[in-house]
Image (cartoon, helix red, strand yellow):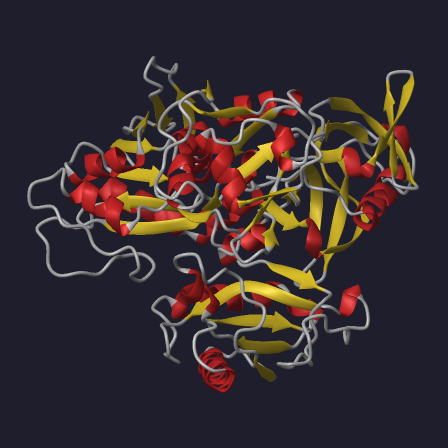
Amino acid sequence: MMPFRIPASIAACLLLGLSALSAHAGSFRATLTSGVEVVGDIVDFHDGYYDFQVGETLKRIKVEDVSGLSLVELTAARTGDRPSGDNVVPAFTLEKSSGQPVAGQIVQFQDGYYTVATATGTVQVPVSEVTKIALAWQEASEPKIAEPSVAKLSGTLRIRATAEGVERVVPEILQFYAKASGQTGKWSPRQADGSRIYNVEFSGEREGLRIELQADDPISAVAAVLAGNSDIAILSAELTTEELAAVAATVPGGVIRSRSAAVGSQEAAPAKIAIELTRLGPSGAVVIVNADNPIEKLSYDQVSGIFSGKITDWSQLGGPHRRIRVHSLAQHSGLKSIAKRTVLKGGDLMLSAYQVDTLSELAEIVSTDPTAIGLTEAASVGNTKALKIVDQCGTARAPDEFTLKLHSYPLSDTYAVYSLPDANSQTKEFRNFLKADLTQSFLKSRGLPNDRVVAVRSPGLSINTEVGAGTSATNAANKQDAIERVSTVFGFASGSVTPMDGSEKKVDGLKTFLDDRDGEKRRIAVVGFSDAIGTLDQNIAVSSARARSIQSLLSQHGIKAEKILALGPMFPIACEVNPGGAELNRRVEIWLY
């Protein structure tokens, strides 16, 4: 995940509250984007800088260099409008753009969320929703934590995962499960084969849950589920139809259902063995280089040439005359599968690539070696530079949260969870836990794959955009009035005006997103698109019909869309030369204006 930049306006509000407490307010740990940590009292904020009092030294730190703030201590303040008595501590009231204000102690700031300990429990508040932070006071007693709403499981849960999942995604999910269910968890030492055991324990005598986590290749991980040797397979890339067939061939009578079916399950003719699919959220293979590398983007062919060993020197790409050092995960990588099915066109990574065991190790090596290049996940870029990928139509796309959710980034894919439909009770409960709003919100807060709806401002778009008017519309008065494109996208089959399966779930997610932003009062436009096949008139007509079908669907759920746009093949999100590109372009988007 890219380092989070604290907006200066929000930081100013936070420090206005803090400065009222002077240097006695409390000590904070500031984690810098470089990885350095500074612990001290924040005594001032001005001109985009924090002033940290560290012992007798005053350190000045740029706001943009801070990736996180954690409260490490609260001491009795002696200034300001402090109530009498010793049993009070400074706290804050966070006013939001929507909903009720939140009052309590800010115990952490990380990945765009404030963690606030309130009188009724601990809550997370997105920094984007905070309009003002003011000093408050509260009793020093421990905040009441709400009763855990997650079921306490017992028995054994066997998980096979690709290397990327074993390193961070699965451990974070398991640790969150233990916390959310009111339990404690403990990892065993890592074995020689990379496997680990995580024991979740109750405070009482009842047996807890034992999770056996093992790294595996994508196909063999799902094959283990099909054969009954594992309960769940968690992959950083969803299997293709061909890969599913390879899995099925490993089990007598095994037939696995199509990749292109509805979210949550897959459809096909009856089979002796079936598999259920749960999609966690988008994933992608991100190409990273050293931050000082002058290269900003690479084409499909250039990426293929580098990772297949045909391009060996940066000078071949317009950079300095230095040999390219390719680094990759040594074993069980799902990212390699994404690269093979896209830029490598079925080929393999070069055998002479430098092998590393973890993505964190990869990021560390690339950040210190100006000749290095590697494949990682969006959440593991670290202090390296993520390159834009130029698709075969000439459009350069960066791997950010929005392009990954739309699958418009050329190396996008999906974090996929495979299990048997008739799995044991702990597997079914854990599968439900993965899909729960609580878990998905946690994954978003940690920058991990999730299904939460996001929006991005697009100053180049206008609500008055028309086909033939050009693509650089300028009717948005300023950036604050710019169109916001929402990540909820409804897909359509060729020529169809009926949305694909899963639309009801998407509407539910959109409604939650809009409810959370109710204070902004932006209007909704439904925007229909088509692929580039057929005449312009045909494409405008079908995109208009698609937009109207989604407008009707939204209306059934109490969402009023005030405007319809039919833009046909304008603003494609994928190159139709690539497999699946036309399917991605047949869509309806939601714009806020």
Residue 457 sits above or below residue 88 on the image: below
- How far across and down, in percent of the image, does residue 40 sit? 81, 24
Name the residue at 66% across, 20% down: 368
Horizontal side of residue 480 vs 23, given as left or right = left
Quadrant showing the C terminus = bottom right
Nearer the observer, 8 or 54: 8
Residue 171 visible to an observer of this rendering? no
Horizontal side of residue 210 vs 513, given as left or right = left
Nearer the observer, 235 or 586: 586
Nearer the observer, 279 or 396: 396
Figure quadrant of residue 572: bottom right
Figure quadrant of residue 49: top right
Residue 16 sits above or below residue 199 on the image: below
Residue 35 sits above or below residue 585 on the image: above
- How far across and down, in percent of the image, does residue 214 sit? 31, 26
Name the residue at 50% across, 24% down: 327
Horizontal side of residue 186 vs 251, given as left or right = right
- How far across and down, in percent of the image, does residue 223 sit? 20, 37
Name the residue at 21% across, 49% down: 275
Name the residue at 20% across, 50% down: 421
Disc count in the image? 0
Residue 8 sits above or below residue 165 on the image: below
Quadrant showing the N terminus = top right
Nearer the observer, 440 or 33: 33
Figure quadrant of residue 101: bottom right
- How far across and down, in percent of the image, does residue 3 sit? 67, 38
Residue 286 visible to an observer of this rendering? yes
